[in-house]
Image (spheres, grey):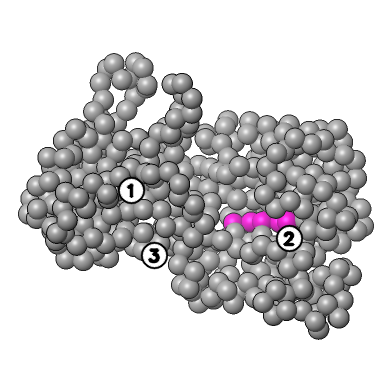
């Protein structure tokens, strides 16, 4: 792997917290993601299953984690199965985890080769009453490909029909939003790499530059800092393109007088960052562009201040909507009649700000969450208000990643230029 391995104390602690949520005589199984084919003998880049990674740190295909706190044999209370490696595999595919390396990475003492899984698991399953199986239950997920977890669950229920079965997803949704200090430090590193990319492009942007050239500049800076690249497909959207919320073509010329919206973030050690900044192609905002920019910035600052323990997500977004409504009135985009006649279920501000203000971030850029759980200390959320005015070819969105603390917030992107004047000064220095 390209990144520096994290201290295995993170995974030891995560497993200790995890087992507190299991029913008596339960065994939990986590499978790695598949390597997905392209064409011929090609494959897509491997991305580990985040739940398995969260509990083991193992960033390798064909791996299985089994947790059985009440196993009769103490050495089987935590078991990791990895693909057997060899000198031949090392020559063709590169170094893989051997048993000692798997223990060092995960803190798990009992390591078996994957070929031993069926025999070992059968013995453990006969001791257990309940089997916990995993699947992707993210609110935004559209699962159309059968995963290793899904195949295992199907086979397990055929082989052990008289066991009780439970879902792992609710446990992971409860655990993963609360970040440890190690996780916060890694996310800070991802944000710092993103900052380097942003400062790089401030010297690069000028009229005539193509959106994909800006994308390439970010990628260059990310890769040279041990990131595997983008945490998600980047948006480099100039002019009207910035009003298309999920614009990812990045194939247009950046023209004088336009503003470029850049929604990008580096990944580090599988943890995501998520930044949005808007810069003027010509190096200076027009008065109108700056007015809209500063309106979004005021909403962003007010929204950040509301990220405190105990706040409910839906109530938070409703309050942000009221703040945005006021800014849109000030910009002349809404008037009092629009407000008086608005539908409560579709407020007038949504014409110009149609997406959510914040989402959890961590191992996934849209990290798992329980929407009804109040915000709590050490949760990390984005703050990303925006105003989109298609008939002015102008879209402004600003986004930082923010840690909720006991008595306020800690902005992981506090050092990334944000004020309009600072961005102009840097572009013209």
Chain-order first, disc 2 or disc 1:
1
Give coordinates of residue 312: x percent, y percent.
Answer: 53, 75
Residue, x 72% and y 38% (percent of image)? 250
> In the rendered structure, does residue 399 fall within the stretch colored magenta?
yes
Q: Which residue is mark 3?
A: 174
Of badges 3 and 1, nearer the viewer stands 1
Q: Which residue is mark 2?
A: 386
Helix, strand or loop: magenta stretch: strand
> In the rendered structure, does residue 11 fall within the stretch colored magenta?
no
Residue, x 78% and y 47% (percent of image)? 241
What is the crowding at mark 1: few (fewer than 14 residues within 10 Å), some, or many (at least 20)? Answer: some
What is the crowding at mark 2: few (fewer than 14 residues within 10 Å), some, or many (at least 20)? Answer: many
Asked if 334 appears above or below 125 in the picture, the reply is: below
Magenta-colored span = 397-401
426 lies left or right of 375 = right
Q: Nearer the viewer, residue 329 or 151?
A: 151
Residue 117 visible within the image: yes
Q: Quadrant of the C terminus?
A: top right
Residue, x 57% and y 74% (percent of image)? 314
Q: Are marks 3 and 1 in contact (CB under 8 Å)?
A: no
Q: Which residue is mark 1?
A: 150
Give coordinates of residue 147: x percent, y percent.
Answer: 37, 44
Give coordinates of residue 234: x percent, y percent.
Answer: 64, 42
Asked if 39 appears above or below 321 in the picture, the reply is: above
Chain-order first, disc 2 or disc 3:
3
Q: Quadrant of the N terminus?
A: top left
29 lies left or right of 44 = left
């Amino acid at each position: 792997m390209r990144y520096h391995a994290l201290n295995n104390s993170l995974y030891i602690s995560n497993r200790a917290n995890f087992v507190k949520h299991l029913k008596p005589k339960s065994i939990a199984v986590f499978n790695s993601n598949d390597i997905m084919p392209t064409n011929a003998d090609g494959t897509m880049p491997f991305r580990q299953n985040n739940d398995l990674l969260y509990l083991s740190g193992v960033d390798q295909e064909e791996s299985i984690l089994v947790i059985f706190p009440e196993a009769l044999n103490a050495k089987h209370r935590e078991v990791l199965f990895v693909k057997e490696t060899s000198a031949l595999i090392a020559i063709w595919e590169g170094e893989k985890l051997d048993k000692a390396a798997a223990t060092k990475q995960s803190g798990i003492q009992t390591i078996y080769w994957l070929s031993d899984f069926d025999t070992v698991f059968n013995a453990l399953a006969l001791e257990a009453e309940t089997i916990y199986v995993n699947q992707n239950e993210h609110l935004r997920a559209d699962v159309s490909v059968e995963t290793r977890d899904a195949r295992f669950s199907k086979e397990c229920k055929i082989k052990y029909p008289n066991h009780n079965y439970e879902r792992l997803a609710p446990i992971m949704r409860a655990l993963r939003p609360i970040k440890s200090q190690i996780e916060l430090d890694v996310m800070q590193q991802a944000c710092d790499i993103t900052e380097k990319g942003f400062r790089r492009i401030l010297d690069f942007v000028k009229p005539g530059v193509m959106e994909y050239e800006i994308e390439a500049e970010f990628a260059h800076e990310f890769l040279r800092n041990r990131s595997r690249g983008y945490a998600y497909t980047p948006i480099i959207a100039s002019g009207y393109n910035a009003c298309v919320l999920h614009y990812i073509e990045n194939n247009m010329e950046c023209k004088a007088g336009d503003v470029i919206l850049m929604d990008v973030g580096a990944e580090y050690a599988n943890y995501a960052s998520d930044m949005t900044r808007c810069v003027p192609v010509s190096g200076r905002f027009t008065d109108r562009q700056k007015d809209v920019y500063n309106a979004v910035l005021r909403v962003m600052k007010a929204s950040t201040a509301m990220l405190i323990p105990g706040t409910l997500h839906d109530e938070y977004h409703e309050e942000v909507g009221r703040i945005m409504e006021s800014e849109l009135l000030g910009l002349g985009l809404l008037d009092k009649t629009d407000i008086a006649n608005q539908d409560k279920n579709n407020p007038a501000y949504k014409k110009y700000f149609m997406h959510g203000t914040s989402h959890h971030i961590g191992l996934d850029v849209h990290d798992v969450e329980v929407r009804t759980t109040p915000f709590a200390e050490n949760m990390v959320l984005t703050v990303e208000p925006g105003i989109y005015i298609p008939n002015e070819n102008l879209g402004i969105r600003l986004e930082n990643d923010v840690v909720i603390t006991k008595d306020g917030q800690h902005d992981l992107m506090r050092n990334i230029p944000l004020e309009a004047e600072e961005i102009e000064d840097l572009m013209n220095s």
